[in-house]
Image (tube, helix red, strand yellow):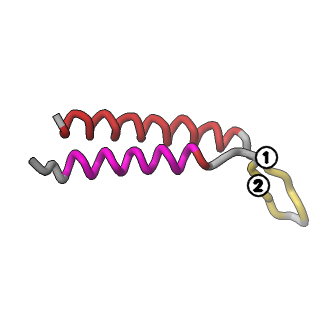
Amino acid sequence: MKETIGRILTIGGVLGVVYYGYQYFQDSESFEAFGADVAVSTGDYTPIIISAVVMLAGIVITKFNVR
């Protein structure tokens, strides 16, 4: 049972990191200043961190299945 929950959390976390990472990337703007490309992001990185924590929790639950 714990292994199944761990796998679900891992998969959900990976999907969240990919989805919110893509959104964060799309919210970035780049421009050239003094001959160098500068990127500025207006996105929110909090959902990426939460998804990564959920993913890591799923991995820990799956790998360290304590009975």
The residue at 21%/45% (across/down) is 62
Left or right: 53 as drawn, with respect to 33: left
How packed mark 2 is, by other alpha carbons closer than 10 Å (few <14, some 14-19, many 20 or more), is few
* As drawn, 11 above or below 54: above
Left or right: 1 as drawn, with respect to 6: left
* As drawn, 53 above or below 3: below
How packed mark 1 is, by other alpha carbons closer than 10 Å (few <14, some 14-19, many 20 or more), is few
Q: Position of residue 67 (x, y in %)?
A: 9, 47
The residue at 21%/33% (across/down) is 4
Q: What is the magenta segment's predominant secondary structure?
A: helix
| Residue farthest bottom in this picture | 34
| Relative depth, front residue between 65 and 21 | 65
Q: Give the mark, 2 or 1, whose residue is nearer the N terminus.
A: 1
> Magenta stretch containing residue 60, yes or no?
yes
The residue at 29%/48% (across/down) is 59
Check the picture and name the quadrant holding the N terminus: top left
Label 2 to label 1: alpha-carbon separation: 6 Å
Q: Position of residue 35 (x, y in %)?
A: 86, 64
Q: Label 1's element?
A: strand
According to the image, label 1 marks what residue?
Answer: 29
| Residue farthest right in this picture | 34
| Relative depth, front residue between 11 and 26 | 11
Q: Position of residue 55 (x, y in %)?
A: 38, 45
The label number, if any, that marks residue 60 in the structure image: none
| Residue farthest left in this picture | 67
**Contact (Cβ within 8 Å) of mark 2 with mark 1:** yes
The range drawn in magenta is 47-63
> Magenta stretch containing residue 49, yes or no?
yes
According to the image, label 2 marks what residue?
Answer: 39
The residue at 52%/50% (across/down) is 49
Q: Amino acid at mark 1?
A: Glu
Q: Amino acid at mark 2?
A: Ala
